[in-house]
Amino acid sequence: MDFFQSQETLTTIEWILRAVVAFFFLVIVAKVMGQRAISQLRLLDFVIALVIGNIIAHPLSDEGLGLKGSVVTTTVLVSLYLCGIFLILKWPWFRKLITPPPINLVKDGEIIYKGLKKARISIDVLLEELREEKVEDVKKVALAIWEADGKISVFLDPKYNPITPANYQLVTEPFDLPKLIIKDGKLESKQLKQINKDEEWIVSNLKMQYQTEIKNVLLATIDKKENLKVFLYK
């Protein structure tokens, strides 16, 4: 375990071992921190990600620094992070202290300049975000809000919203997520059991409808009406 401590020099194997330990340690840290820290970087998430990355990076490039200190420090920081998340969920006043409130950027088709200044974004950034939401005209926006995670939530004026069956009070079928039954040329047995089908049924339908075999299928799905959709390797 000498590679774990600070050394004047490290062999190639010791550098590799140090990198492997750091990698798996960070995977465990990410797992403990949860999906929230990975999917969206709010203030607390950003601070912890920045600090941990800096702490772990140095021992991987400097043999004079031991990995043990970085592991201990990171463990303490993750513990503090989890305590912070608990406090955010438990006490609203702490949540307001850490997570800034949303800021209105556009309201009823009018740009709110004070909101832009408060969020510290330019007109160009606002227009870029609107374009990403497929909005070409600010006048069509009923409300645009700068969220705490740095994203902009955009709500169109009702008269510019796409027409849906609900507008005409039409009855639609319930949502149905097709089952994935073949992936990368391999059969998904668990999914087949859920729809009460077997391999023989799949083989027969592939041969009849697509004149192919399971090994030639990149992806195949089936819905509750037993509609089989197949994508072949090309």
Image: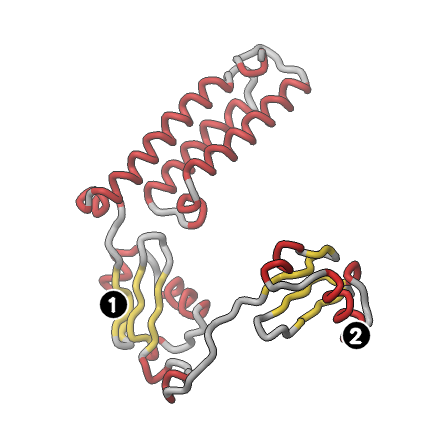
Location of residue 54 with respect to 200 vertically, above or below? above
Q: Residues within 10 Å of mark 1 (few under 14, many from 20)?
A: some
Residue 49, image quadrant: top left
Q: Residue at x 45, y 31 (%)?
A: 54
Residue 221, horizontal then vertical, whole percent? 64, 66
Give the spatial CA distance, label 1 vs label 2: 61 Å
Instruction: Using the image as rendered, state which of residue 196 and residue 234 is in the foreground.
Output: 196
Residue 45, horizontal then vertical, whole percent? 37, 42
Determine the secondary structure under disc 2. Answer: helix
Residue 159, image quadrant: bottom left
Location of residue 144 with respect to 85 vertically, above or below? below
Q: Which residue is mark 1?
A: 112
Which numbered disc flags the more N-terminal residue, 1 or 2? 1
Q: Residue at x 62, y 54 (%)?
A: 190
Protein image colouring: secondary structure
Q: Which residue is mark 2?
A: 208
Instruction: Using the image as rendered, state which of residue 200 and residue 143 is in the foreground.
Output: 200
Residue 101, horizontal then vertical, whole percent? 24, 54
Residue 53, horizontal then vertical, whole percent? 47, 33
Looking at the image, residue 72 sits to the left or right of residue 155; the answer is right
Q: Residues within 10 Å of mark 2 (few under 14, many from 20)?
A: few
Quarter in which the C terminus is drawn: bottom right
Q: Amino acid at mark 2?
A: Met
Quarter in which the N terminus is drawn: top right
